[in-house]
Amino acid sequence: MPVRPSLILGIETSCDETAAAVVESGKSVLSSVVASQTNLHAEYGGVVPELASRAHAECILPVVRRALAEAGVRLDALHAVAVGHRPGLIGALVVGVSAAKALAWSLSVPLIGADHVHAHLYAGDLGASQETEFPAVGLVVSGGHTSLYLLKSWTELTRLGATIDDAMGEAFDKGAAILGLPFPGGPSLDALAAGPGADDRALDFPVSRLAPTSLDFSFSGLKTSLLYAVRGLPGRGGVFERDHRSLSDARRADLAASFQRAAVRAAILKLERALDQAGSISPGVKTILAGGGVTANSRLRRELAELAARRGMALRLPEARFCVDNAAMIAGLGFHLLGAGPPSPLDLRAVPTAAC
Ligand code: KG4
Ligand code: ZN
């Protein structure tokens, strides 16, 4: 059997997905297993950190075993173990980091700590037939993060801006809850907004611009506008006169489509600003990278493709299964981190905040 160079096992447990993947040379995904905890958290309308940690502890070894089996790779064939060690829920991260350390130590292979947000930027490169050209401008839109980056390579990045309040995915989830849609809210709202007859111009929701050159985001005003559109203005003691049960199906779909239009507009507007400004820091930006759960959104995907075409730039947009949390993006980025610097020490810590 030919020797496989750079077979990396990736592990991801930062929030509510227990994931493991085997990726070859940073590109070729041999397996990607994700055990989702969506049903576990659904009745609470959001992720309960302690429940998430316990479920990770139960699932991590079966998920790693399955990823190896699906890839047809034995443990002793691995060249390195990469793990998302920041940012995320601390108790959840600790499970993946402990498993990765134990595996790397027992196999005597390098351990690679990867930043989860950084890995979302990499997800669009998985399976790509051509090399990504740099400099690139990257947009991460997920449930916990909304940020813009300038990248000179896969391992050299500068943050250009970030949300000052809600993340874009969080705004979708809260917007969906206001509309009475099922958890997880983002995909539910997307499906309703994309349905036949939904009018995205029914309401002119605000698109936050902040200062004229700002590359930061704000989604709280949009969320409040939707709240008032659904419930009316609050009366004495902050009590609303109605809730989503008074909405007709047609009105609910119109509100979802109008909300989605405004949210996507805000993301595209800041990305366009970043592309304009990045040229003066690092001339000749060639590629747009986008990643994170919200890049699964049908409207955002369409508008990103239109923007890239308008600007004559390449677009790296992950396939649907790599938009949301997964371990293939961790293993893929791990390949480049290992090529660019020393491995992580075996006392690598789980850290709740992002490095970038
Ligand atoms: O990247 P991810 O899996 O987890 C974090 O790192 O946060 O992103 C999850 C987020 C959730 O807020 C979810 O509602 C959102 O991505 N999301 C979507 C769609 N699919 C997932 N938001 C809008 N439209 C979608 N189709
Ligand atoms: Zn994520």
Image (tube, rainbow, N blue to C red):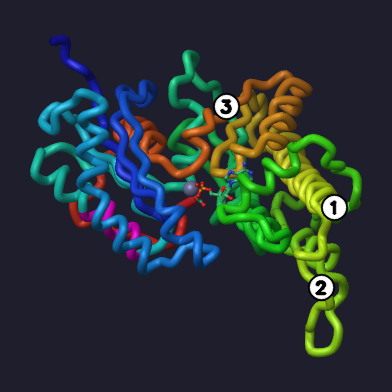
Give the residue pinned by disc 3. Answer: 316
Q: Which mark is residue 332?
A: none
Report the side of 239 relative to 304 (left or right): right
Q: Which mark is residue 251?
A: 1
Is any part of residue 87 visible from this angle? no
Give the quadrant of the N terminus: top left
Q: In the image, what residue occupies the spot 52% across and 63% down?
A: 46
Q: Callout 3, which amino acid?
A: Arg
Mark 2 crowdedness (10 Å alpha carbons): few <14, some 14-19, many ≥20? some
Q: Quadrant of residue 246?
A: bottom right
Q: Is mark 1 within 8 Å of ligand 1?
A: no
Point out the tag, 1 or 2, that comes first from the N-terminus: 2
**Which stretch did the figure color magenta?**
91-98
Q: Callout 1, which amino acid?
A: Arg
Report the side of 135 relative to 207 (left or right): left
- Point out residue 93 in the picture as x, y percentages from the top left corner: 33, 57
Is any part of residue 316 visible from this angle? yes
Q: CA distance from mark 1 to mark 2?
A: 14 Å
Q: In the image, what residue occupies the spot 82% across and 69% down?
A: 231
Give the residue pinned by disc 2. Answer: 242
Point out the tag, 2 or 3, that comes first from the N-terminus: 2
Report the side of 18 relative to 220 (left or right): left
Up/down of 337 relative to 189, above or below: above
Q: CA distance from mark 2 to mark 3?
A: 43 Å
Mark 3 crowdedness (10 Å alpha carbons): few <14, some 14-19, many ≥20? many
Q: In the image, what residue occupies the spot 63% across and 21% down?
A: 314
Report the side of 102 relative to 291 (left or right): left
